[in-house]
Image (cartoon, rainbow, N blue to C red):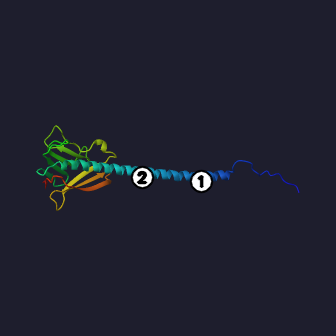
């Protein structure tokens, strides 16, 4: 019996089918990897944005509470009837603030979306943003509202809200502010 030469036997290399299958598997793996990386990047960006909103709310709350806590027992805190502003008379001078009347309010018009503080009757100081401009990242808007806590003579309920430029709310925190020295709290007209 005569043997035919084996011309089909391959010595090295891959067939076209093997190469196509390998390329298809690689394409699927790359697609999955890109999806995972993209999802992770989006989640990190959302976490960063939420963290920035929380930091802004905490900074505003801390600064407002600092002003309120400087009021002594003989001083007066007046909350606007609409809750959009608070006026604090501080008789004690501290390392941070001179004695006087301070008004904390939500800025409207140019600079809207920021909480401002001004020393009433002191034109030399003028109103200024209660937190540095560099704190306002991600185009956030922050507002505070104030009310006297129901059933309490000395506790102020402060609501701090942080939204983005489209009005999406990121942080909404209600804080009970209990001034250290128990000043008189009244509701203005």
Residue 165 seen: no
Report the disc number at residue 43: 2
Of mark 2 and mark 1, the one earlier in the sequence is 1
In this picture, residue 6 sits left or right of residue 100: right
Report the disc number at residue 54: none
Residue 44 seen: yes
Where does the C terminus fall, quadrant-wise?
Answer: bottom left
Which residue is at a point 16% across and 60% down the rendered structure image?
A: 152
Residue for badge 1: 25
Q: Residues within 10 Å of mark 1 (few under 14, many from 20)?
A: few
Label 2, label 1: how far apart the Cα atoms are: 27 Å
**Rendering quarter of residue 135:** top left
Relative image position of residue 140 (x, y in whole percent): 31, 48
| SS at circle 1 | helix
Relative image position of residue 182 (x, y in whole percent): 15, 54
Q: Residues within 10 Å of mark 2 (few under 14, many from 20)?
A: few
Which residue is at a point 28% across and 42% down the rendered structure image?
A: 133
| SS at circle 2 | helix
């Amino acid at each position: 019996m005569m043997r035919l030469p084996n011309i089909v036997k391959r010595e090295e290399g891959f067939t076209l089918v093997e190469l196509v299958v390998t390329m298809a598997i690689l394409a699927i793996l790359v697609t999955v990897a890109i999806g995972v990386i993209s999802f992770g990047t989006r989640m990190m960006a959302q976490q960063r944005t939420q963290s920035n909103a929380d930091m802004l709310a905490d900074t505003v709350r801390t600064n407002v509470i600092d002003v309120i806590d400087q009021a002594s027992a003989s001083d007066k805190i007046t909350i606007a009837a609409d809750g959009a502003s608070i006026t604090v008379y501080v008789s004690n001078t501290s390392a941070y603030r001179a004695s006087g009347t301070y008004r904390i309010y939500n800025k409207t018009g140019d600079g809207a979306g920021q909480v401002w503080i001004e020393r009433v009757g002191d034109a030399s100081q003028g109103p200024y943003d209660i937190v540095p401009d560099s704190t306002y990242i991600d185009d956030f808007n922050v507002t505070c509202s104030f009310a006297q806590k129901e059933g309490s003579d000395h506790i102020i309920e402060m609501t701090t809200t942080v939204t983005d430029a489209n009005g999406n709310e990121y942080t909404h925190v209600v804080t009970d502010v209990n001034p250290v020295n128990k000043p008189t709290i009244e509701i203005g007209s």
